[in-house]
Image: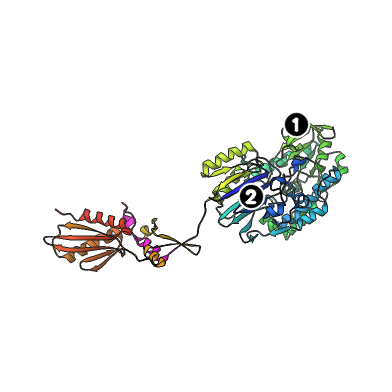
């Protein structure tokens, strides 16, 4: 039996470093190639030596990148330029535009600020992006003669896509990160009812069902307003694109409505980057943004200004959006160190934080953070977590499975205990297998083969003309109800020139040049029925028409009836009674038995 093999090199029972190796129909595909935000050593990138001892280009048929977040694309230049891969890389146009921006930003932090060596260069990022082939939503792209991929809108962030991958009759869907509910700037994920052999889904929020978005937004605005009212500073760590646009629209609108004068800042360059790419890819945003874009750019904020590092020490309240989003490096971490000791201040974490990051530590209640350079920070400020994350929650994951109708499900990009809970729920509700392999573990998913079989028209017509089983309901005898009932098709499967056909027995004899030998059964029924033979023939015709439908029963002559063109009824005059001869072929044994029961129950020998 054919099978699909899946090995996570990252994101197996873990969030971060998404990198899934798939073998399907003899093709080897890598799904995402991310880095882990929680590590600064060899564990930061996937272990590519696991794949093969030889060149990666010879082994992999292609790489697919779902979106621009670094935990999904951060290891790409390292793999292509330092490990060595020259094959095709597929992603959407917005992802291709934004990947190098975030990769270069990460490189600057790692190399120029932290002084790391053995890291990819700016030239390597550019050379890597030259290998990219862009895909359009809903367009089927032929990678080679056997492998085809199709991208679908995933919500989550600008340019994020799910991918439907097909090799021959085998198929899988890889979701990447997705969101099943629309937000203030992006629409909800959507995919065809494609019924893949395997659905590989993220499960970041495997056990979470989010509350009302409107309540969350109200709570967020109240917390920010209360903090600045008491003279505190509010830090909101965000990634350069995605949630920051969502929250900026929300806060800018609120400041305007409340006529607040407290300054709101965000990282220099963020405004230009956001506006440039949202303007360029406006068709990827939601309907409201597209509709108002002609009159007003929603990303030209009235109350939000660029941030300068010197503002960190400014007295008085302020709100600052700073990157990156998990407090693992960069400006957001520098501001946190400055403001953490003041109890009036607040940090709001608007999304998921990977284990090992400062964000994860403070969300778990850490009151003191130790850093690599033997410094430490006391955490006295208020720490709030408000899920504005653009990941599907448990309800959204179940909704996607229900719509997609996969034969198997695999959970990745989540925490083991939460994945186990969702796995049991999926198996119970959908009665399908669910897998959750760890990093380096291979799951083998057996796949049933779908074959295209042509059915001959004469056989279909013959099958549809056969009567259905008897029913107590009066309506079941009508033509309409009979045609709606399921019928069993009996035929011969012929394989010829790699084509499969199901034909009737006589057609099969003709196709194969075989002389047919018909075997017929005849049952003799003696009945006490006075009067001429034509009267019995007519009465029998009426009875069978009522039971089977008038189109099934034909009068051949005064002494003979035909049923479904293959069963014959002859009536002989054997004074003082009559003899009914019922004859059928072995193919029509069911119909013959049914007619025998009808005749015997209505005409009896005394």
Stretch of the chain drawn in magenta: 452-479
Residue 444 horizontal side relative to residue 493, left or right = right
Identity of the residue drawn at 69% across and 48% down: 52
Residue 22, label in figure: 2
Q: Secondary structure at mark 1?
A: loop
Local packing at callout 1 (Cα closer than 10 Å; few below 14, some 14-19, many 20+) is few
Residue extending furthest toward the bottom: 557
Depicted 530 relative to depicted 375: above or below: below
Nearer the observer, 212 or 177: 177
Nearer the observer, 251 or 342: 342
- Whichever of callouts 1 and 2 sits on the residue coming sooner in the sequence is 2
Q: Is residue 156 visible?
A: yes
Residue 40 horizontal side relative to residue 15, left or right = right
Q: From mark 1 to mark 2, how far is it between C-alphas? A: 39 Å
Residue 323 horizontal side relative to residue 27, left or right = right
Local packing at callout 2 (Cα closer than 10 Å; few below 14, some 14-19, many 20+) is many
Residue 452 horizontal side relative to residue 140, left or right = left
- The residue labelled by disc 1 is 366
Nearer the observer, 487 or 521: 521
Q: Secondary structure at mark 2?
A: strand
Percent x, y for residue 356?
A: 74, 37
Is 461 a magenta residue? yes
Residue extending furthest toward the left: 576
Q: Is residue 299 visible?
A: no
Percent x, y for residue 199?
A: 59, 49
Percent x, y for residue 187?
A: 65, 53
Quadrant of res 163: bottom right
Is 527 a magenta residue? no
Say which of marks 1 and 2 sits in front. 2
């Amino acid at each position: 039996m054919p099978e699909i093999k899946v090995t996570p090199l990252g994101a197996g029972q873990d969030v971060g470093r998404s990198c899934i190796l798939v073998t399907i129909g003899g093709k080897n595909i890598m799904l995402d190639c991310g880095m882990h935000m929680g590590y600064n050593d060899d564990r930061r990138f996937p272990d590519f030596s696991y794949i093969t001892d030889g060149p990666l280009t010879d082994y992999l048929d292609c790489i697919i990148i779902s979106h621009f977040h670094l935990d999904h694309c951060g290891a790409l230049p390292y793999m292509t330029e330092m490990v060595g891969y020259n094959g095709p890389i597929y992603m959407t146009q917005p992802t291709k535009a934004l990947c190098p921006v975030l990769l270069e930003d990460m490189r600057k932090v790692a190399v120029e600020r932290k002084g790391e060596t053995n890291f990819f260069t700016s030239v390597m990022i550019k050379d890597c992006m030259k290998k990219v082939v862009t895909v359009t939503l809903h367009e089927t792209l032929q990678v080679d003669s056997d492998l085809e991929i199709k991208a679908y809108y995933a919500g989550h962030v600008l340019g994020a896509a799910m991918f439907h991958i097909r090799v021959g009759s085998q198929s899988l869907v890889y979701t990447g990160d997705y969101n099943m509910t629309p937000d203030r700037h992006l629409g909800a994920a959507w995919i065809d009812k494609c019924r893949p052999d395997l659905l590989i889904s993220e499960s970041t929020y495997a056990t979470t069902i989010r509350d009302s978005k409107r309540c969350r937004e109200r709570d967020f605005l109240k917390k920010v307003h209360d903090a600045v009212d008491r003279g505190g500073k509010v830090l909101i760590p965000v990634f350069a694109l995605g949630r920051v646009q969502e929250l900026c629209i929300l806060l800018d609108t609120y400041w305007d409505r409340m006529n607040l004068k407290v300054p709101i800042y965000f990282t220099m360059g963020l405004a230009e980057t956001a506006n440039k790419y949202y303007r360029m890819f406006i068709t990827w945003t939601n309907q409201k943004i597209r509709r108002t874009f002609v009159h007003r750019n929603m990303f030209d904020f009235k109350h939000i200004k660029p941030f300068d590092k010197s503002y960190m020490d400014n007295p008085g309240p302020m709100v600052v959006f700073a990157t990156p989003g998990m407090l693992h490096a960069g400006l957001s971490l520098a501001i946190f160190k400055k403001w953490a000791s003041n109890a009036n201040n607040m940090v709001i974490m608007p999304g998921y934080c990977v284990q090992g990051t400062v964000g994860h530590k403070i969300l778990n209640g850490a009151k003191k953070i130790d850093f690599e350079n033997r410094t430490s920070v006391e955490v006295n400020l208020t720490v709030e977590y408000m899920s504005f994350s653009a990941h599907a929650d448990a309800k959204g994951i179940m909704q996607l499975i229900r719509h997609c109708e996969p034969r198997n499900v695999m959970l990745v990009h989540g925490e083991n205990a939460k994945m186990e809970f969702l796995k049991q729920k999926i198996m119970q509700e959908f009665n399908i297998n669910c897998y959750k392999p760890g990093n380096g573990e291979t799951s083998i998913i057996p796949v049933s083969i779908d074959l295209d079989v042509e059915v001959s028209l004469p056989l279909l017509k013959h099958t549809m003309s056969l009567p259905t089983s008897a029913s107590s309901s009066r309506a079941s005898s009508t033509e309409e109800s009979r045609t709606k009932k399921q019928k069993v098709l009996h035929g011969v499967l012929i394989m010829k020139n790699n084509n499969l056909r199901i034909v009737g027995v006589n057609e099969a004899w003709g196709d194969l040049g075989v002389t047919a030998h018909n075997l017929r059964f005849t049952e003799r029924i003696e009945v006490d029925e006075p009067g001429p033979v034509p009267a019995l023939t007519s009465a029998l015709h009426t009875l069978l028409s009522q039971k089977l439908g008038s189109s099934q029963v034909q009068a051949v002559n005064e002494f003979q009836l035909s049923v479904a063109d293959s069963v014959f009824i002859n009536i002989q005059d054997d004074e003082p009674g009559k003899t009914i001869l019922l004859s059928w072929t072995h193919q029509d044994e069911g119909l013959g038995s049914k007619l025998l029961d009808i005749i015997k129950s209505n005409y009896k020998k005394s």
